[in-house]
Image: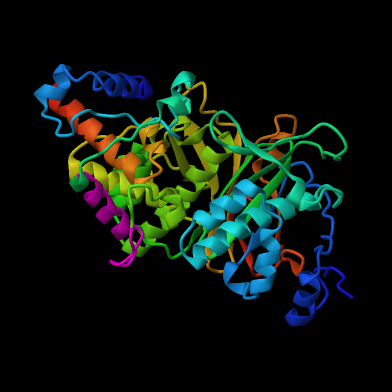
Amino acid sequence: MHRLLRGDMLPLPSNLVSRHLVVSSLPSLPPAPFPLRREAHLWYIVPNELEDASLLQDYMKLLSPCEKENVLSIKGEALKKCAILSRVLVRTTLSRYTDCKVNPRLFKFRKNRFGKPEVEHQNGCLWVPPSLQFNISHTSSMIACGVTVDVPIGIDIEEKRRKPVNNILSLAHRYFSPYEVQYLASFMDPESRQSEFLRLWTLKEAYVKALGRGFSGAPFRDFTIRFENSTDSVVPERPKSEEFRIMIDTASDSVNLTANWQFALVELCGSHLAAICMEKDENMPGTEQEFLKLKVWKTLPFVEDKCMSQTDAVINISGLC
Amino acid sequence: MATVSAASVRFASLKPASRSNQANGVTSGVMFVTIGTSKLSFHSLRSSRFRVHCAAKPETVNKVIDIVKKQLALSDDTSLTPESKFSSLGADSLDTVEIVMCLEEEFDISVDEDNSQNITTVQEAAELIEKLVLQKAEAA
């Protein structure tokens, strides 16, 4: 019986499952409850864990003609696989939040005028859930999709060990704000500097993606991400304690660069950094605005979903309750 | 606005007798204009009736290809063409800004955010570079 697997069940042997999936229709996905207020959901796929070629073929069937064309235009099996999984992740994730009434294949997407992808809500028979917001990010080794209800979200993931090809301070001088350059320069140890660079990078990316105005709508040098600890030191330096808050500064006269955004930074699977940016809810009491709630699932759609929240796979660096 | 200047430079070069053509010795007989998928803001220009091809100098294209290969750690025998899309080669946003920074250093130009967002292929990068190099020479 090709029942869909819940998080607490042992996975069926993969050859059994894949044989069923080769039959015309894929089984349904387990529905997911909506994210609550101040809550973001994060679903991720690890491409290397998919070895079943027939499953990948089944996944291809979920893509739109345009998406299929894009996949076919990509050279290299690994990149093709990531492109397929990226679309499958978005489509299946959204489907879960429609109580699985909407087949993943049926979603249509469009870009806002700045190029940010969004769901195109169609009138008619399809049940359209309340305003689902999503954002994807991928590296060669992980693809992630963040989901919220009503609230714009941006996410960015990066391999922890990623080493930029160029010199970090050169990159920072070219793209970051003066405060951030000074902050990075304060780290003498190259590995620490690299690590802090990636933290700033992912947070800045997540913010720009949440704003949805494109890279040119929110130039990196026009806003500052900084880490504030309890001593609230003015001079940029490494936070003294382990705990810190992620703050954003934008010019007060900036119309487009708003500052009412909440950030979280987590380590995923010991190998990746994930930055999440959500718009603050002005109606919430002040202290509750400080943190966001995050639920994380690892998925291989139609095969296995595993809830990873409250496990070692998700380590809060800053910003989570 | 970067997009306005792009349009004006491109159209000026369609006139064979234009000063910019003669003064800078553009080697191709007539300079065509690529409109295709670029994100120009004038909607009329996006019509495919205007689609022609732009030939950036081969040496510019090759330098871009070298930088892209190095950034993305592609093997020497990976074949890249002017039409190669950065995202299809596996470049993410950090790769793209690193590539842009390398191009700026290699060609001694400055690419603003509007333009860097619009570089999605080797060809677009090469064309933008030549445009900026030209602008810089004219301003000097």
Q: Magenta residues, as a range?
A: B60-79
Residue B37 position, x and y percent, is 45, 35
A113 vs A98, left or right, is left
Colour convention of the picture: rainbow
Would you say residue B64 sits in the magenta stretch?
A: yes
The correct choice, above or below, for A19 with respect to A198 in the image is below
Picture quarter containing residue B60?
top left
Q: Residue at x 36, y 19 (%)?
A: B4
Q: Nearer the viewer, residue A135 or B48?
A: B48
The correct choice, above or below, for A23 with respect to A13 in the image is above
Residue A51 position, x and y percent, is 62, 75
The answer to whether residue A47 of the structure is visible from this angle is yes
Q: How many marks?
A: 0
Residue B84 position, x and y percent, is 38, 51
Q: Quadrant of the N terminus of chain B?
A: top left
Q: Quadrant of the C terminus of chain B?
A: top left
A309 vs A274, left or right, is right
Would you say residue A89 sits in the magenta stretch?
A: no
B140 vs A1, left or right, is left
Picture quarter containing residue A149?
top right
Q: Residue at x 32, y 29 (%)?
A: B33
Residue B73 position, x and y percent, is 34, 63
Q: Residue at x 33, y 52 (%)?
A: B81
The answer to whether residue A253 of the structure is visible from this angle is no
Q: Main secondary structure of the magenta part?
A: helix
Q: Nearer the viewer, residue A171 or A43?
A: A43
The correct choice, above or below, for A312 with respect to B19 in the image is below
